[in-house]
Image (tube, rainbow, N blue to C red):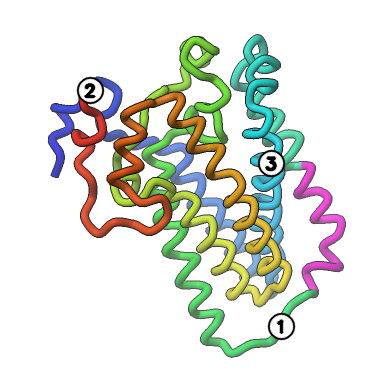
Amino acid sequence: MADSSALPKGTQASWHHGPSWLWLLSFLLFIGGDALLGRWLLLPLYVMGFYGGMVVIDLLTYPFLERWRRWLRPRGLRAWYGVQVGLIWIGVTVVLALLSTWWLTWRWDGPPVLQIVGGVLLAVAVGIGVWAAGQMGWARLLLAGAIFTPGGGAEEQHVPQVLVVQGPYRHVRNPLYDTDVMIILGAALLTESWTLVLLLGVYVMQLMLQIRLEERELLERFGERYARYCVRVPRFFPRRTPVDPREIHLR
């Protein structure tokens, strides 16, 4: 196990309770609500709204990073969250809710074993997502680090510019993307929803386009540290033994 005291300041392991437990609570609430309703309604709407909104956000962010940075520099982090959550996510969710009588009925009747597999996948993915989000914290989520760079608002907005190599990030570079795929697939199997299967295909295609832009931006921000991280830690398929953070954060 790595000695965190030997790591540079700001790179030691820490746990951010807010985003991690809110992530878990959201799934418990929606699955519990569907149990009370006796039908799958809230969970598929939540997954469709969250990841449908995420696809739109990603497509509108990395290709236009410099424009977003210029517009948001005088407006701050709250304006960025307002655009993402207030306009895009809520907007996508409202549209999906209005169309729900159409897409919620696009289901299949399969063997119960598929629903069991889906439930297990969903539970495992949410658990890993809680672990990953706990390492990041609010100020690093929702692409904030890419928008507010060092000298470009990061200091004023208190957005940490630290390459996270803790928790699941010691095994794989993109644990949240892995769990995204597992959550959509698990929810699709659990709720027997063809619409979520379609969403999964769209999300994976968008991710393949986005990941190159994201990695290029991270390389610009973190330089040799990120290059070493890419060499030692796989993009999507976890390594069995965790990387020692000291191998990445060389002085």
Residue at the outermost bottom position? 111
Q: Is residue 79 visible in the rendered structure shown here?
A: no
Q: Are marks 2 and 1 in contact (CB under 8 Å)?
A: no
Give the x, y percent position of residue 95. 83, 50
- Kindly identify the amino acid type of the residue bearing the numbered disc 1: Trp
SS state under label 3: helix
**Which residue does the numbered mark 2 point to in the structure image?**
8
Q: Which mark is residue 59?
A: 3
As measured in the structure, the alpha-carbon distance from the residue carrying label 2 to the one carrying label 1 is 53 Å
Residue 238 or residue 99, whichever sits in front: 238
Task: Look at mark 1 in the image and give the residue it sits on.
Answer: 108
Crowd rating for badge 3 (residues with CA inside 10 Å; few <14, some 14–19, many 20+): some
Viewer-side label of 3, 1: 3
Q: Which residues are magenta?
A: 91-105
Please identify, in this view, whether the residue under mark 2 or under mark 3 is nearer the observer.
3
On screen, residue 162 above or below 152: below
- Which kind of residue does numbered mark 2 sit on? Pro
Specify whether 214 is left or right of 92: left
Q: Amino acid at mark 3?
A: Leu
